[in-house]
Image (tube, grey):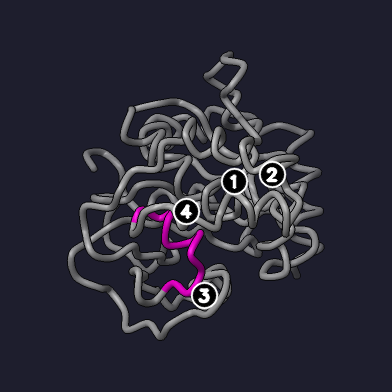
Amino acid sequence: MNNMEISIFITNYREAFGEAVELPLVFWYSDEPVAETEKINGCFFKGLSAVRKGMPISLNAEIIGCGGGKFYTGFSEMPERVPNFVSLKEKYKNTPEMVFDFIADLGVMRATKKYLNFARIDTIDSFDQVEAVLFLATPDILSGLTTWTYFDNNAEDAVTAIFGSGCSAIVTQAINENRREGHRTFIGLFDPSARPYVEANILSFVIPMSRFKKMYHTMRDSSLFDTHAWNKIRERINDFNS
């Protein structure tokens, strides 16, 4: 994208949060895979551990073993068993009808390309085609990310925490928001079914590209630079991760 460089963002991000901080991930659709990826049985979040180490993955309906994961990434229709499963088996909603209503309101977009790719941000060349930037954040890092988000946005929904599976809270919400050129960001990974695949102190924070293309330019003006309060938090983040 114009006036947005991966290397500059990484430099700013590491300066803001410290050299020890984990770099964010990105995801996007394509007609060709960027990596050979074996089938992932169960939650495809199992595959994110490789991405966090710098090894991209490319997902499609055959690689994703979870029916909900296929649906929320746009590769299939909603499996008939989902409303009953989410309500009666997982007990995440009181009734199957509530699950139907949630999915109807969510409006999952069908994928128009063959693969959904995940990569660590330092392994891609540009932000072209990227749908969103995904941070896997401790509370201290989340504090910085949300404070940066609020810097130029007074909207009540500038930062949201919306019910959903791990994949819907991260992928579906971000893609929908990006396609509508929206400003919302999303805290996620509250889903007990997805939480086993991240550390106990990690939540997700997703910035759709429609929002990130503005926030990219505001980072150095925000409290993440040259403020006493954030300097103390940065030190703690790096002491913890060193």
The residue labelled by disc 3 is 47
- Name the residue located 33 percent from the left edge and 69 percent from the top edge: 60
Q: Is residue 207 among what the camera can see?
A: yes
Instruction: Report if residue 70 lies within the magenta region.
Output: yes
The residue labelled by disc 4 is 11
Asked if disc 3 and disc 1 are in contact, CB closer than 8 Å, the reply is: no
Q: Amino acid at mark 4?
A: Thr
- Name the residue located 79 percent from the left edge and 34 percent from the top edge: 229
Tell which circle, 3 or 2, labels the residue nearer the N-terminal end: 3
The residue labelled by disc 2 is 142
Asked if disc 4 and disc 1 are in contact, CB closer than 8 Å, the reply is: no
The residue labelled by disc 1 is 205
Asked if disc 2 and disc 1 are in contact, CB closer than 8 Å, the reply is: yes
The span from disc 3 to disc 1 (Cα, nearest Å) is 18 Å
Q: Amino acid at mark 1?
A: Phe
Image position, residue 47 (x, y; %):
52, 75
Rendered view: 166 above or below 149: below
Mark on residue 231?
A: none
Instruction: Report if residue 161 lies within the magenta region.
Output: no
The span from disc 4 to disc 2 (Cα, nearest Å) is 19 Å
Q: Nearer the viewer, mark 4 or mark 2?
A: 2
Determine crowd level at label 2: few under 14, some 14-19, many 20+ residues with C-alpha closer than 10 A. some
Give the extent of the magenta segment.
64-74
The local secondary structure at tag 2 comes to helix
The span from disc 4 to disc 3 (Cα, nearest Å) is 26 Å
Determine crowd level at label 4: few under 14, some 14-19, many 20+ residues with C-alpha closer than 10 A. few
Q: Nearer the viewer, mark 2 or mark 1?
A: 1
